[in-house]
Image (cartoon, helix red, strand yellow):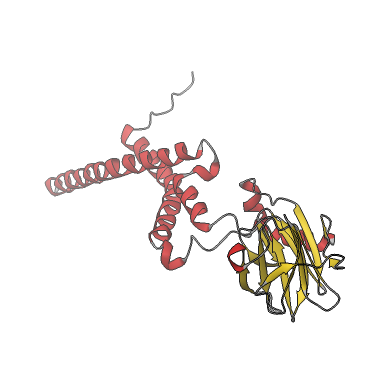
């Protein structure tokens, strides 16, 4: 004849559930608390300006950089375009620009043609000025080059134009003008292309978005918000069962003291 195992009192079972569910909820509560504190100080922490560089985290979001669409060598340096962004080497120049048309050295600087604009870039790789149609740049800019005497020439929708020494005025080039035109390629040095694409990729995902997704659980996909909802329900359970267990335990201790006092 087998012995029956003594049944565990319901209160004891509730203590066990309270303990293990509390441990499970603690981790999620810690995530909610830390991300909530950080999000409350987004501006001070500059979470909307700082971007994720971790390849693993970027891969989790499925973020990839587009290929290099154009690259021009000028003055011993490369100007590249990825998406709508322009880079001088791996240094970002412009976040939004038209198609890269060419780049030529000028007075120790670089003149970059992109869309209908000319961009003046310092030797340190900083954008000094953007010039468009209001500055006299030929409409329908297609190519840029240099004449033998160093002056800049541009091919626009209505023909070839030559600029003065200060790039302040443009006039139609004399017939038969010879120029060395900038040529752009789609295949820059592979190592440079990889670095530029990595730099582009590291400017897409702000930390604010990651913390928001952690806080809501969306970083874990469709089930993530349900997990956070479950954590909230666990907290409700713990908040209600904890005081009840404390009250029951306190009541038992009082009864025990009364029995002990009566037995004396």
**Residue placed most toward the observer, 187 or 120:** 120
Residue 88 visible in this rendered orientation of the protein: no
Q: Is residue 1 above or below residue 52?
A: above
Question: Residue placed farthest to the front in the image?
Answer: 175
Q: Residue, x 25% and y 46% (percent of image)?
A: 246
Q: Is residue 176 above or below residue 66?
A: below
Q: Quadrant of residue 202?
A: bottom right
Q: Is residue 182 left or right of residue 19?
A: right
Q: Residue, x 66% and y 65% (percent of image)?
A: 137
Give the x, y percent position of residue 249.
25, 45
Q: Quadrant of residue 101?
A: bottom right
Q: Is residue 100 left or right of residue 38?
A: right
Q: Quadrant of residue 95?
A: bottom right
**Residue placed most toward the observer, 208 or 152:** 152
Give the x, y percent position of residue 214.
49, 49
Question: Residue placed farthest to the top in the image?
Answer: 1
Give the x, y percent position of residue 125.
68, 74
Residue 69 visible in this rendered orientation of the protein: yes
Q: How many marks?
A: 0
Question: Residue placed farthest to the bottom in the image?
Answer: 108
Q: Residue, x 53% and y 45% (percent of image)?
A: 219
Q: Is residue 7 above or below residue 122?
A: above
Q: Is residue 188 above or below residue 165?
A: above
Give the x, y percent position of residue 132.
62, 64
């Amino acid at each position: 004849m087998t012995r029956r195992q003594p049944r565990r009192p319901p209160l004891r079972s509730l203590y066990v559930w309270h303990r293990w569910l509390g441990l499970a909820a603690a981790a999620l509560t810690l995530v909610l608390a830390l991300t909530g504190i950080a999000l409350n100080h987004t501006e001070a922490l500059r979470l909307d300006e700082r971007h994720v560089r971790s390849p693993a985290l970027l891969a989790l979001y499925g973020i990839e950089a587009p290929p290099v669409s154009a690259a021009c060598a000028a003055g011993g340096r490369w100007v590249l375009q990825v998406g709508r962004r322009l880079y001088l080497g791996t240094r970002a120049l412009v976040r939004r620009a038209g198609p890269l048309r060419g780049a030529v050295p000028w007075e120790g600087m670089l003149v970059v043609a992109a869309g209908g604009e000319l961009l003046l870039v310092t030797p340190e790789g900083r954008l000094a000025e953007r010039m468009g149609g209001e500055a006299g740049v030929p409409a329908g800019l297609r190519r840029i080059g240099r004449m033998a005497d160093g002056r800049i020439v541009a091919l626009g929708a209505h023909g070839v134009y030559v600029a003065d020494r200060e790039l302040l005025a443009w006039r139609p080039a004399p017939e038969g003008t010879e120029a060395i035109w900038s040529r752009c390629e789609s295949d820059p040095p592979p190592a440079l292309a990889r670095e530029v694409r990595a730099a582009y990729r590291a400017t897409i995902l702000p930390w604010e978005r990651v913390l928001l997704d952690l806080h809501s659980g969306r970083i874990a996909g469709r089930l993530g918000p349900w997990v956070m909802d479950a954590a909230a329900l666990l907290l409700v359970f713990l908040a209600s069962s904890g005081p009840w267990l404390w009250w029951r335990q306190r009541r038992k201790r009082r009864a025990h003291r009364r029995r002990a006092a009566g037995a004396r």
